Image (tube, rainbow, N blue to C red):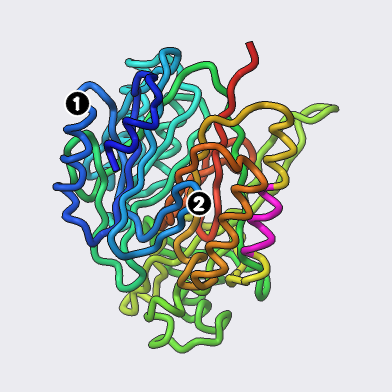
Amino acid sequence: MGRDLLAGLGGETAKAVIIYATINHDQTAAVEQITKLFGPGIPIIGCSTPGMVSNENIVEEGFALGGMVLGGDALQAAAAVAKTFQENSLAKGKSMGQSLKASLGKPDLVTLFYDPLCHGDVEQMVAGLHAEVDCPVVGGAAGQPFGPPIRTFQYFGNEVFSQGAVALGLKGPFTVDIGVGNGTVPSGVVMTVTKTDGPCILAIDDAPAIECWSRATGYSTSEILHQNYMAAWAIAIERRRQVEGEAGPVEKVSHLIRGAFGIDVKTGSIIMQTAIPEGTKIRIHHRDVDAVLKGTADMGKEISAKLAQRKPWAVLGFECAACTSPFLGIEATVDENRALRAAVAPQTPWLGMMAWGEIAPCLGLPAFHNYTYALAVLTETAS
């Protein structure tokens, strides 16, 4: 794969490489082989994933490697890493942002990958990162095959590790358009988170969170412990923000979709990837095939309209791994992604991952999502 990436540069100078590998690979051996080809001076980041998209090819599980090399004399790139980001996630995010700024000044785009299983607060990490770089941030959580969560891997140069986060900053003569689509529909009434402990929701409407989850989904406590049931449902978080309108500031309301990453029977709590403040309004959502496909198609139409006559030169995709083959099936997943590519940038180099969490904007700020498809399209800036 590395030689194919080098050949695809067409004489341009390599500036950065993004790589993905399914978990079946010897992670260290795969990453080391690629880094040897590019040398120590090229920022290389990536992560393990249960599946990936490379142009027209869509692969989930098995043995697969995917990559994209970004190059050109006008492009600048830098990478940053945070080990054990669960230890003060906000500060670790800030540290990565400061490292990128030291190399690039203000980046034009940051791509982020992280370990969703280390109990770090991903939204705090993203907030710290964005406070420093003040630019769009997109990305995804590393993953493994569908099943009980065990371990994911992150790549930084020739290092392979877990419990970390890696970021790639890009700066140059390009514009980035980001689209977001999700595939859930609401179920039940609006409720309020009334007690939390870090990323754990302990109580909803003053009742144990696990009881509320069981009532809303119709599954028993023993059933919701199984990933097939847990992955079928999510929580929609209400987000409000003042944005500038034609007549001054106006309040906008949007929703973030968040999946449960564990159930603690002893405490009756639902474990999330990020803390949810007490008093937050929520509603239980569930996956829906039509909603997944419509969300992706609508996103493609929206981005295509924004592009107008601008020429895309790279596309990065981050699709929730709970909405692909484990839910849609292989055939529908292939059709979904090929239709999206045809609508947005059919001839452009395209690299996507199946993620265990997605990073994309919400009301103008980067945010953490689940059950979401985020797409970043990089286009040439008119001279």
Left or right: residue 231 versus residue 98 is right
Query: Front-most of 272 and 61?
Result: 61
Q: Is residue 195 visible?
A: yes
Amino acid carrying label 1: it is: Gly
Q: Secondary structure at mark 1?
A: loop
Other residues around mark 2 within 10 Å, as few (<14) / some (14–19) / many (≥20) = some
Q: Which mark is first along the chain, 2 or 1? A: 1
How far apart, in angstroms, are the residues tagged by discs 1 and 2? 28 Å
Mark 1 or 2, which is nearer the eye? 2
Q: Which residue is at a point 25% across and 51% down the rendered structure image? A: 153
Q: Which residues are magenta?
A: 292-300
Which label was assigned to residue 39?
1
Q: Position of residue 24 (x, y in %)?
A: 23, 62
- In this view of the protein, which residue sits in the foreground, 172 or 366? 172
Q: Name the residue beneath numbered marker 2.
A: 56
Most distant residue in the top direction: 383
Would you place residue 78 above or below residue 255 in this image? above
Q: Which mark is residue 347?
A: none
The picture quadrant where one finds residue 76 is top left
Residue drawn at (46%, 19%) of the image: 171
